[in-house]
Image (spheres, rainbow, N blue to C red):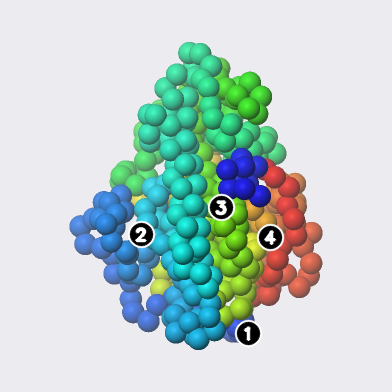
Amino acid sequence: MHAADPERRNAGGLRAQRGQPRAPGPAPERASERAIEPLPDLRPDEQLSSLRTRSPSRRELLALGIGAFVVAGLPLAARRGRRLLRRTLPVMGTLAELAVVHDDPQRARAALEAALDELRFVERRMSRFSPDSDVGRANAGAALAPVQLSPETGQVLSCALHMARATAGAFDPCLGRLTQLWDVTRRREPPAAEQLSRFADRHLFRSLELGGGASAPSVRFSDADVAIDLGGIAKGYGVDRAVAALRAHGIRDGLVNVGGDLYVLGRSRDGDLWRVGVRSPGDPTQLSHTLHLGDAAVATSGDYARGFSHAGRRYHHLLDVHAAAPRRAEEHSLTVVAERCMTADAAATAAFGLPAHEARALLASCAPGAMLATPDASRVNPGAPARRSHLSDVTHPHSSESI
């Protein structure tokens, strides 16, 4: 499918590796031989800015809460005639890493540029921080009159509303004002209770009217408190578009990762399934478990990468619409494997913090055939084959419906 086709469309904790699957053992894998030190005197947004003119180190990636990058040496690939070309750059407020395995460097570079163009396209259309994006224009004017959207933004918003309805608001793309109120990257204490009560127990997605059809969509807000925030789905959509661009250029093997929303194509440079390590939320130098994947998407939601602590409680960016506050969760991260990254992205956002039985039911209804699992592998989609209950054996998830 062509990359421009709109049908192919939480800094996360994923590390992509290569190699043969190894038997799971009681000891966690090491994500790094050295302790990860925070970057001095730089907030995450300043760290990203400092990386715009150079390639980041592994230490910097992990300090930013991003643990997804290829960590294989090139000599073995060169001996086999399979070269790996890689690009890493800031996009969508996080870091994107793209890698392709191909014996033609010129074609590989062209494919990487096309994939990066797709990510930049999605950022221009769907960033809530840009007043010129579709989302920025809608948030500024849709409470007064309908605002025209691009077909791509209309498609993603339609999928987001579908997920909101299917999850009874556990996933809500209209909480932009509440997200801005919490602003967990800069706050050091919660907002006042009277500020939060304005948003508690409100399903604001029901106050967004999407009309105009697929080719010329428009949006109107019937409540002034609505503000679109596609942060829980747009990165996954961007990954899917980038993957489609790679395939359109003849790339069969590679990797696209945007801040932990990740898709692996085919096989690694040595012909093995890709090894995707899920970072331990309690220790960024450890991997909690490993997935062996090919042609599959992975997304992780967690409370450890973005947030602050106050009075003994952790406050993060994944909000509970009923309390108008960060969700309380027994487990600190949750991983979804699916056929498309947009599906995995939204499902991981929606399912984080839910009780186990509700998380299983959500996945069965919104992303059938995908796999939902916490680091201890206690949550799996009951519709998946039994052999997938062990995370180290996961390969090729079944097809999942579009969200």
| Secondary element type, mark 1 | loop
Image quadrant where one finds the C terminus: top right
Q: Which residue shows up at 44% across the image and 84% down it?
A: 75
Residue 305 % position (x, y)? 41, 57
What residue is pinned by disc 1?
23
Picture layout, residue 194 above or below residue 185: above
Residue 317 % position (x, y)? 45, 46
Label 1 Cα neighbours within 10 Å, binned few <14 / some 14-19 / many ≥20:
few
136 or 213, which lies in front? 213
- Labelled disc at residue 64: 2
Q: Separation of disc 2 and disc 3 at Cα?
A: 27 Å
What residue is pinned by disc 3?
245
- Quarter holding residue 262: bottom right
| Secondary element type, mark 4 | strand
| Secondary element type, mark 3 | helix
What residue is pinned by disc 4?
371
Picture layout, residue 333 above or below residue 133: below
Residue 222: in sight, yes or no? yes
| 325 sits to left or right of 275 | left
Q: Nearer the viewer, mark 1 or mark 3?
A: 3
Q: Are marks 1 and 2 in contact (CB under 8 Å)?
A: no
| Secondary element type, mark 2 | loop
Q: Amino acid at mark 2?
A: Leu
Q: Which residue shows up at 32% across the image and 68% down it?
A: 57
Q: Separation of disc 1 and disc 3 at Cα?
A: 35 Å
Find the residue positioned furthest to the left: 41
